């Protein structure tokens, strides 16, 4: 293997490449494009995955939402079309009977399902907005980003039915001057004075938007005369439990307690966030798999192209190889030179593709930044995957180089010298 470190060997490789500059460049572009495409697609897939995960950073993904609807099957003397009204008693029963539940948050709201919105008044300004009645536990399910100086509802607010509220960022902008501190200010909601204790910034997965108001659940129930009725509940399963199974258990339990037919799927409506998240996760995994397949296939095609070029080169250099053999060059030296040429071309092409791919990803990341309208966040590529790709193309370059190398070795010096 001494010839690898000999200057003459590399000069001959350089001379061979220089003689076929156009052909070599076109061939190298194939491998470069393959690595570039592999790096770029892998980075974009990662960017989509990062964007998707960031949307759920402040939200428990193994969560479901459940509300009452109307029965579709008569049962035990009850007619079809009976309205199902969820109550705090249902919440207590589910807590005690279903061990899979981590959190359960009853919620109420004005401004939905035909109910009038709450009337918000500050000074001479007024507006109609959704008003939510919540327990502090909702913050564990869907984390609220509260601006500095404020806070969310706590247990003391619930216990003493305090008249406090948390307002959305949009309401703050409508009713307060820039840099004006709303914390501690008193406003009217449906004619009753409330103290502002916080301003929240909506999250990407927030369902309340930035123009809603939060009140302590007990205060909401009293002011809007809801008693023990609730609009819906948010349920989060324990980390090691399947939220789909939990949803089935919850519905079956409610059916049994409410005298609903076991086969009635209309009595209680639900939305399973965990199931939807799993579907999107599966889509992203499939996209990554396709990226690997496309990238690897392109790499293989490029390496094969290099092998074909080297075969043509060997044919064109038949006389030269014959002279070298006649002057004492061993088969291993001839074979090694051809293989070194193949390895060099594939490695350089792969390195160029990697550089251009990472530069494009960096440029996209710089342009997009944290723009929430574009579902790409920090499109990076796993360095181990890149090293794996570069190593693979070098191995492929070595293997593919064996074909023209063996072809060169098989040329007999006498026949080569005779060939014009």
Image (cartoon, rainbow, N blue to C red):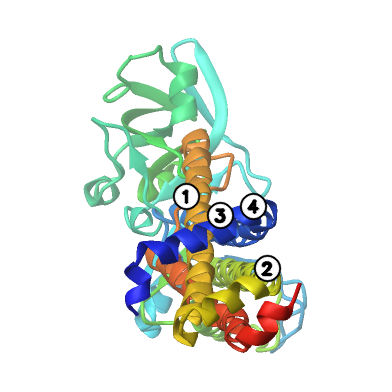
Residue at left offset 70%, top offset 69%: 316
How far, Cα to Cα, is label 1 from label 2? Answer: 24 Å
* Sooner in the amino-acid sequence: mark 3 or mark 4: 4
Residue 166 drawn above or below residue 96? above
How far across and down, in percent of the image, does residue 368 sit?
A: 52, 37
Q: Which mark is residue 21?
A: 4
Mark 4, secondary structure of its residue: helix
Give SS at disc 2.
helix
| Label 3: which secondary element | helix
Residues at circles 3 and 2 in contact by the CB criterion of under 8 Å: no
Disc 3 to disc 4: CB gap under 8 Å:
no
- Quadrant housing the N terminus: bottom left
Residue on which the image places disc 2: 309
Mark pair 3, 4: CA separation: 27 Å
First in sequence, mark 1 or 2: give its number. Answer: 2
Number of marks in the image?
Answer: 4
Earlier in the chain: of badge 3 and badge 2, it is: 3
Of circles 3 and 1, the one toward us is 1
Look at mark 3 in the image and give the residue it sits on.
40
Residue 258 visible to the viewer: no
């Amino acid at each position: 293997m001494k010839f690898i470190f000999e200057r003459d060997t590399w000069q001959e490789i350089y001379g061979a490449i220089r003689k076929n500059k156009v052909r070599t460049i076109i061939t190298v572009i194939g491998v470069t494009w393959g690595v570039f495409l592999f790096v770029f697609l892998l980075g974009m897939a990662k960017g989509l995955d990062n964007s998707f995960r960031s949307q759920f950073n402040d939200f428990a993904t193994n969560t479901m939402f459940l509300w009452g609807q109307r029965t579709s099957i008569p049962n035990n003397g009850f007619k079809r079309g009976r309205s199902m009204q969820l109550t705090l008693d249902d919440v207590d029963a589910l807590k005690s009977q279903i061990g899979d539940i981590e959190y359960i948050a009853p919620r109420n709201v004005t401004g939905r399902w035909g109910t009038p919105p709450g009337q918000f008044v500050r000074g001479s300004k007024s507006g109609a907005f959704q008003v939510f009645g919540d327990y502090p536990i909702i913050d564990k399910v869907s984390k609220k980003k509260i601006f500095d100086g404020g806070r969310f509802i706590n247990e003391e607010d619930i216990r003493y039915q305090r008249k406090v509220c948390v307002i959305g960022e949009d309401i703050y902008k409508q009713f307060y001057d820039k840099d004006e501190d709303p914390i501690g200010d008193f406003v009217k909601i449906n004619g009753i004075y409330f103290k502002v204790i916080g301003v929240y910034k909506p999250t990407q997965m927030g369902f309340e938007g930035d123009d809603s108001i939060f009140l302590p659940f007990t205060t909401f129930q009293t002011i809007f005369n809801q008693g023990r009725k609730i609009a819906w509940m948010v349920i989060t399963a324990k980390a090691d439990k399947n939220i789909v199974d939990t949803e089935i258990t919850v519905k079956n339990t409610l059916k049994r307690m409410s005298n609903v037919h076991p086969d009635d799927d209309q009595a209680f409506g639900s939305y399973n966030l965990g199931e939807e998240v799993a579907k999107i996760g599966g889509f992203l995994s499939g996209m990554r798999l396709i990226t690997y397949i496309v990238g690897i296939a392109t790499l293989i095609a490029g390496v094969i192209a290099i092998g074909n070029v080297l075969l043509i080169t060997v044919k064109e250099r038949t006389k030269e190889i014959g002279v070298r053999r006649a002057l004492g060059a061993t088969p291993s030296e001839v074979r090694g030179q051809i293989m070194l040429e193949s390895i060099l071309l594939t490695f350089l092409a792969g390195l160029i593709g990697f550089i251009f791919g990472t530069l494009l990803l960096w440029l996209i990341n710089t342009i997009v930044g944290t723009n929430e309208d574009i579902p790409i966040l920090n499109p990076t590529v796993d360095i181990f995957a890149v090293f794996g790709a570069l190593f693979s193309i070098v191995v492929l370059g070595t293997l593919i180089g064996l074909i023209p190398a063996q072809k060169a070795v098989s040329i007999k010096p006498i026949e080569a010298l005779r060939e014009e």
